[in-house]
Amino acid sequence: SGSGYVSSAHVAAGMQTLTQDSLTLVSTTGTNAGAATDYDLSAGTHTGTVTTATINLAGSRSYNGSVYFLGSDFGTISTGVNSETLTLSGSGYVSSAHVAAGMQTLTQDSLTLVSTTGTNAGTATDYDLSAGTHTGTISTTTLSVTADDQTRVYGSSNPTLTLTISGYVNGETYATGGLSGSASASTTASTLSPTGSYVISASTGSLAASNYSFSAVDGVLTITSLNVPDSSLPELTKHSSTPLSPYLCTTPSSRYAGKRPSGAGFFRGRSFVCDAIGWNASPT
């Protein structure tokens, strides 16, 4: 019973002299029973050898089209001994590159333990991978489904709303990445919505894939005003002795005295400037 000690806690020290300290012989009973008082430790020569502790790896990473797991995919390795940690270099591999395979047996290959420094530093030579049981699990990679930004002028129809899917790995595309279904985009802006910015809402819709998941990213529709040069106004303006609401303008224009007051508006997606009487016909 009790305990003794060696000078180093590390495997690299090999066989070391063991100090008896509180180690005490204890009698046994039954077959081959021995009486402790018949024996003595104090005059003995004692040694202690520290052997490696086995590390079991459980790696997890996103789909990248490869069967290999890099050391960095495992992050910091907790040894379970005195809060010591290690890292890994090299790579190991599983049999399938696909998410559907679930948790797979991982072959160690060139994966190697690396010592760490600082708080919770661990010494790589105190641990061993060769006797461990290692696994690797591949999870889906997220693709961004982004509504493309659009711009149009007030009064015109919304442009065709389009989306871009990004984030494919290993050179894959919609066709080669095993995708199916489609995404969609929509906006609350209508033809006569005031100038400004409107959200184009992206939806992942019916998109599906075994190795990918999807995240929708909204875009922006910008509605601008249509400014018509003064030189084109005579061709756009028609006059009438009977003004029609809401196209009345009553403030005279200093630039075109008696002809074009400064009031302005929109009609069917085109800008207009009222004359002294008002509007009675749509601009051409």
Image (cartoon, helix red, strand yellow):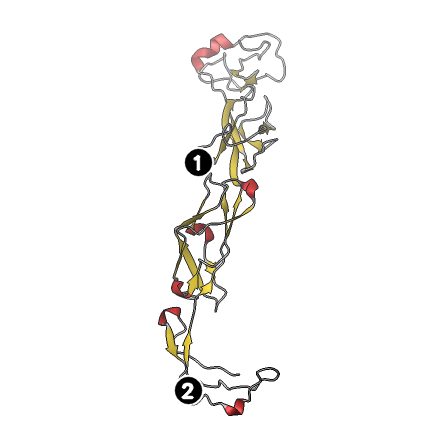
In the rendered structure, the answer to whether residue 15 lies left or right of residue 105 reads left
Of tags 2 and 1, which is closer to the observer?
2
Q: Is residue 153 left or right of residue 88?
A: right
Q: How many residues crowd around disc 1 within 10 Å: few (fewer than 14), some, or many (20 or more)?
A: few
Q: Total label count?
A: 2
Label 2 packing within 10 angstroms: few (<14), some (14-19), many (20+): few
| Amino acid type shown at disc 1 | Asn
Task: Find residue 176 and report its horizontal and vertical position in percent.
Answer: 49, 29
Which of these two is toward me, 65 or 42? 42
Label 2, secondary structure: give it: loop
Write the residue at 52% across / 16% down: 272
Q: What is the spatial separation of the Cα atoms under label 2 and label 1, in whole angstroms?
A: 65 Å
Residue tagged by mark 1?
Answer: 170
What residue would you read off at disc 2?
44
**Residue 96: image location, x then y, percent:** 50, 41
Q: Which of 269 and 160 is in front in this view?
A: 160
The location of residue 101, given as percent across then percent down, is 55, 42
Residue 278 screen position, x and y as percent: 57, 13
Q: Is residue 27 above or below residue 207?
A: below
Give the residue at x 56% y 22%: 158
Which residue is found at the position 60% from the left and 82% from the top? Answer: 31
Q: In which quarter of the image is residue 277?
A: top right
Which kind of residue does numbered mark 2 sit on?
A: Gly
Is residue 207 visible in this depiction of the protein? yes
Q: Which residue is drawn at 51% across and 83% down?
A: 2
- Which of marks 1 and 2 precedes in the sequence? 2
Which element is circle 1 on?
loop
